[in-house]
Image: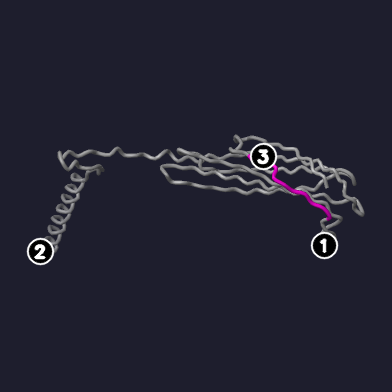
Amino acid sequence: MSKLLAAAIAALSLSVAAAGAASAGAQTEQKRIYGYQDGQTGTFHAIDEVVPDAATTPTFTGTFVITFNITIKSHFPKTPIIECGVGVFASSIGVVNNVETNIDYNEEGYSAGTGSASSATCVVTIPYSWTLPQTGTAVHDTVGASYSVSASTGTAASGGYSLRSSGSSVLSLKQIPATGSVTTKTIKVTL
């Protein structure tokens, strides 16, 4: 027999043996079943498999529109420049199979006011798009907002300075607004 023919027969024999071993391994592969065996009776008790909730993370979109009606009672050397700012924060905590997922968002918006020496109006619009963990046995959502309204006689570059400001919290919700919502709030501010 030639060396080439002997090598071919050996390779063929090796591949048949490997295929048989793989086939035998595939036949003995079994699904693992978890449980416990009763020590007194010897009976095996299977534990039901817990399948986690389908993980869904919905996206909530919407807009916050905060309108400021400002009464100016402070005395300024000239008609002040009014600036309004709003910060919105959202937090969602979801619990799935005793695993907590927490996600936070912070949004900010600013606007210049229009008006006269005695009154002004600002409108701050903040669109948002948040993906939140809303699936599970417990979900805790909060949305809050705070604002600041200031009056100054110029910009920092022109040597102006803030003469008066006012701020507070403006919004406190226990759930995220429904997707597509426009959440409005009107605030009266005196400077």
Q: CA distance from mark 2 to mark 1?
A: 95 Å
Mark 1 is on which residue type? Ala
Of marks 2 and 1, the one in the foreground: 1
Magenta stretch bounds:
163-172
Q: Is 171 part of what is drawn in magenta?
A: yes
Kindly state the secondary structure of the residue where label 3 is placed.
strand
**Circle nearer the N terminus (2, 1):** 2
Kindly state the secondary structure of the residue where label 1 is placed.
loop
Q: Which mark is residue 2?
A: 2
Kindly state the secondary structure of the residue where label 2 is placed.
loop
Work out which residue is located at the far front of the displayed protein and give it: 40
Residue toward you, 88 or 57: 88
Which residue is at a point 82% across and 53% down the rendered structure image? 164
Residue toward you, 62 or 121: 121
The residue at which mark 1 appears reads as 157
Secondary structure mostly seen in magenta is strand
Of marks 3 and 2, the one in the foreground: 3
**Circle nearer the N terminus (3, 2):** 2
Give the answer, above or below, for where 69 lies relative to 12: above
- Residue 9 rendering spot, x and y as whole percentages: 12, 57
- Residue 155 rendering spot, x and y as whole percentages: 83, 58
The quadrant of the image that shows the N terminus is bottom left
Q: CA distance from mark 3 to mark 1?
A: 33 Å
Mark 3 is on which residue type? Thr
Mark 2 is on which residue type? Ser
- Residue 82 rendering spot, x and y as whole percentages: 82, 49
Q: Which mark is residue 63?
A: 3
Could you tell whether 20 is left or right of 120 in the image? left
